[in-house]
Image (spheres, grey):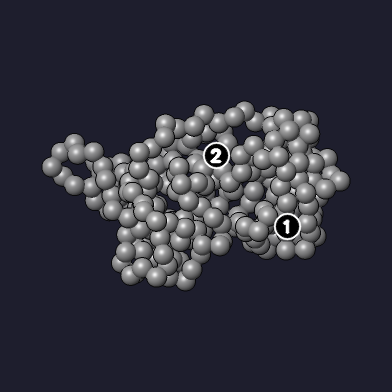
Amino acid sequence: AVSSPTPLPNPSAKPVSGTAAKKQSSQPPVTAVVPSALNLSVDAAIQMRVLIYEEADALSISLPKGADLIDVQTGKLLIQIPSNSNYSVQADGKTVLMGSMQLPQLVWLDPADNGVTYIGDRGYRGRLLIAGNGSRLWVVNHVNMQQYLYSVVGSEVSSSWPMEALKAQAVAARSYALTYYLKPVKRDLYDLGATEYYQVYKGIESEAKSIRQAVNFTSGEFVSYRGGVVESLYAATD
């Protein structure tokens, strides 16, 4: 079973372009770069764990390309789900019910061919951890930093913004995400949530070409102060 997470104190501001850090000296924060091994994309190497559903009664899941369903505890493949499958998912206190299947309380849903998993009408890249806790469901999206930022930056600002503004936003959003990657809300389950309490994350619906370019141009860049990662903050208006 999964216990309820302990929430962080409600922040007074939330992350995005423009950074704010407590002044401890006259030296301002600087932009740093995460070193990349073997010339791989740094953002693609960092896995974020994003809580996308908390204490849900039931969920509707669609798998256009199919998926592997895996027991988290044993690593055993439970079933290979065919493409274009749709399921209603619930928890009954002892198991997770996916259609007619009775599953362990912790299962991985790993889409085939790097596919997208839809929960309702919202699509998510990466794999999903589905956890039953009593009669409620928790879902955590394990997605790399690059794909996470494609969604976050596009959710927080308009894709029509000038490229330099989008790039600044990407750096700020990456900095904020890294603070939770290093100090997760609930270490054994997830790093941060998907709402405006943290950074808004909507899966693939907020991706756009200009957003992807801004994230890729700034890959690995974050705001640093005295060797640490700055939790870059901003206030958004509608």
Judge whether 184 appears above or below 120 on screen. Answer: above
Name the N-terminal-most of marks 2 and 1: 1
Judge whether 68 appears above or below 55 on screen. Answer: below
Q: Which residue is mark 1?
A: 62
Q: Which residue is mark 2?
A: 190
Q: Position of residue 37 (x, y in %)?
A: 43, 55
Q: Residue furthest front?
A: 238
Q: Is residue 184 left or right of residue 86?
A: left
Is disc 2 placed on a helix, strand or loop? loop
Is disc 1 placed on a helix, strand or loop? strand
Rate crowding at label 1 as few (under 14), some (14 to 19) or many (20 or more) other CA atoms within 10 Å: many
Q: Position of residue 125 (x, y in %)?
A: 60, 57
Residue drawn at x 58%, y 36% is 189
Residue drawn at x 42%, y 67% is 159
Judge whether 214 appears above or below 203 on screen. Answer: below
Q: Quadrant of residue 75?
A: top right
The quarter of the image holding the N terminus is top right
